[in-house]
Image: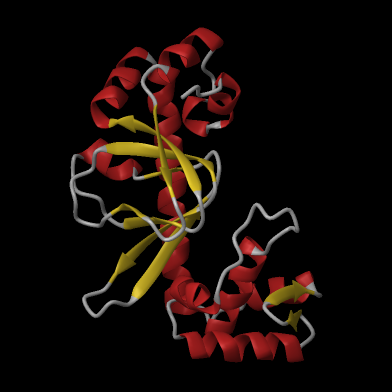
Amino acid sequence: MDVQVEFLQSIPYFSGLGPAQLDSVRNLIFEKTAERGELILLEGEPAEALYFVASGVVKVFKTSADGKEQILCLIRPGESFNDVPVFDGGPNPASAQAMGPVVLYGIRKSDLEVILREHPQVALNATQLLSHRVRHLVSLVEDLSFRHVIGRVAKILLEHAGDGTGLRPRLTQQEMAAMAGTAREMIGRSLKTLEEDGAIRLDRHRIVITDKEALREMAGAAA
């Protein structure tokens, strides 16, 4: 396994580190792969490592006692997950699953402590990243509490629509429902409404955005 320094430079955690510093970090990184549908982390289990996505997409989610899933975020190349428990020592706060074949780079908790001591810049970067994570979760609570389902769907389409490169996974209606905190049937109705309003076009199993500004207006509308 040969982690490229160029890739490490693209990870916000290591912003501001020089080549020699990145080289020392590289020696502490291990590689992990997973196939589509494979669980990478299970909520409640002890946290062993901080992970970065090298390729593919990982969904981070929580599951209720009755099996209902709420997707918290989708993690793409260069982004990290499982940050909080490696810092506070608690268990994994959520589960993580591969949405397709993924390659991950991980740093074990004990090795991360070494990096933080030797490279204070990483600690500063981590503070900023965790702050962004809190803002994301606050925004998610706001969406689930105050925004109509159709507004949530519009926001999901704006944030996660594919760009034709194949780098973004094609979300199923069930996955969109898990992100929007609603039932799959409500997603279907919302998509039909958005199509009738001219904001999107449903083309078999594809959703084509035809009026991005209209979607922005709907995404910004609160309940």
Residue 204 to residue 37: above or below? below
Which residue shows up at 26% across the image and 31% down it? 109
The colouring scheme, among rainbow, by chain, secondary structure or one colour, is secondary structure
How many numbered tags mark residues here? 0
Give the quadrant of residue 108: top left
Residue nearer the viewer, 37 or 15: 37
Residue nearer the viewer, 187 or 30: 30
Is residue 62 found left or right of 37 in the rendered image?
Answer: left
Which residue shows up at 32% across the image and 77% down it? 68
Q: Please identify the residue farthest to the top as the structure is shown.
A: 20
Is residue 51 found left or right of 193 in the rendered image?
Answer: left
Which residue shows up at 52% across the image and 74% down it? 176
Residue 125 to residue 17: above or below? below
Residue 20 image position (x, y, % from top left): 50, 8
Residue 25 image position (x, y, % from top left): 42, 18
Give the quadrant of residue 61: bottom left
Give the quadrant of residue 202: bottom right
Is residue 107 found left or right of 222 in the rendered image?
Answer: left
Residue 94 to residue 49: above or below? below
Which residue shows up at 30% across the image and 44% down it? 84
Residue 134 image position (x, y, % from top left): 40, 51
Residue 32 image position (x, y, % from top left): 39, 38
Residue nearer the viewer, 147 or 111: 111
